[in-house]
Amino acid sequence: MTTGDSDTFFRSRWVERPAHARELEPTALPAGFRAAGVASGLKAAGALDVGVLCSDAPATASAARFTSNAHVGAPVTVSRQAATAGLRAVVANSGGSNVGDGERGLETARASQRQAATALGIDPNQVGLASTGVIGTELPRQPLLDGIERAVAELAADSDTFTRAILSSDRGPKRACLEVALDGGSVRIAGQAKGAGMISPRYATMFCFVETDAAIDAPTLDLLTSVCVKRSFDRISVDGQLSTSDTVFVLASGASGIQIQPQTPDELHLGEAMDALMRQLALEIVHDGEGARRVGRIVVRGDPDRVGQVARAVANSPLVKAALNGGDPNFGRILQAAGQALPSGEPFVCDLEIEGRQVVSATASVLADLTEIAALVQRDEVEYVLTIPGSGGETEVFFSDLSTDYVQFNADYTS
């Protein structure tokens, strides 16, 4: 599986395209939205690095989610103070994360907010910000501001240059647009994301921007966003590292004229489309993990208070991830990782399945020949199901493998 555009957006077997949704051109945008990206000199060789996304509808509703890291970038701080239920625009840049630059960084963030607001004729409080790049370096202010002005001048009903302007170590853009059939007609929902490293469950190092032309109130949109984020970006890991800059913005222009009422079939259908869109975008990030070759899905069932910590321990284990990379059927590493997340002194009892083949029952291996499992773990996507003591709890984490390419890339990241 490769990231970027293809004939089918829903490429993972773990994400099902809703029956009431059909794929459009991946760079298409819902009615009422425009976007653009430009090269402002933040990155070398004329690469696109500043993007603006905006809604032309004054009554646009929005929702936002941010990293849970205690050390956050200035764009996150400023965006949290903005009108997150009524955003009209997003300014995003690559080539500098604006993290750790103190008051100077905060002023750069506020200046970019004002620049976009002036160019678009809206209130600065209606502008959300997102920046990605190296932590602890200055984000050059004037090139950023000049880039915003030029991006606004180039706004169009297409997301191509915008999605390219937000890339960092990504191998390609992650984007899609869906048409969703509802009772009163159809609406569009689109999404653009970036992320490949510093990805952790509990939130991923990523940006995701979602737009819809459905008319939906801010509380309902916020609820849908919360549910969908928990089932997508909260459930992925590349390296277990929690970013300083994670951001999700969801905007609804209402330009379709189709009103989404709470607790109706239309809300359910839109929510299903948003969920599928975000889950596939999240999986695109995992498949694009720096140097990644394969993706695993760990499902843990059992005690509701323990399934989460066990799943994360497995997904973030460098031994498990290295075995996944090599297609090595060393399932003992999964048991070891799970055991370190459970209380010491209690009996370790579990069942483990790999691609539907049971390999452990309670404490005993039921597999005599590793050759069969070796064939199963050669796939691009490998599923593990672990059952621990207790009942009523279930969770999942999608994770990439760990390769020598990942080590080399991050060893030389700033040099």
Image (tube, rainbow, N blue to C red):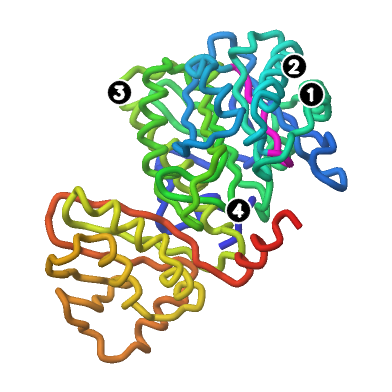
- Identify the residue under disc 4: 7
Which-is-in-front pick, marks 3 and 1? 1
Residue matched to label 2: 115
User: Dot 2: what SS?
Assistant: helix
Q: As drawn, which residue projects farthest toward the front?
A: 102
* Highlighted range, magenta: 88-96
Q: Please say if the residues under marks 4 and 1 sit with CB atoms less than 8 Å apart.
A: no
Side of 87 where 149 appears, left or right? right
Which mark is nearer the camera, 4 or 1?
A: 1
The three-letter code of the residue at mark 4 reads Asp
Residue at image x 74%, y 37%? 161
Q: Which residue is mark 1?
A: 145
Residue 264's label in the rendered image is 3
Tell me what residue is drawn at x 45 percent, y 43 percent: 203
State yes or no: residue 304 in magenta. Answer: no
Q: Nearer the viewer, residue 169 or 244?
A: 244
Residue 94 part of the magenta segment: yes
Work out whether mark 4 precedes mark 1 in sequence or the reverse, and give the earlier one.
Answer: 4
- Asked whether disc 2 touches disc 3, contact meaning CB atoms under 8 Å apart, the reply is no
Pointer 1 with pointer 2, Cβ within 8 A = yes
Spot occupied by residue 373 in the image (x, y as percentages of width and height)? 35, 82
Q: Earlier in the sequence, mark 1 or mark 2?
A: 2
User: Earlier along the polypeptide chain: callout 4 or callout 2?
Assistant: 4
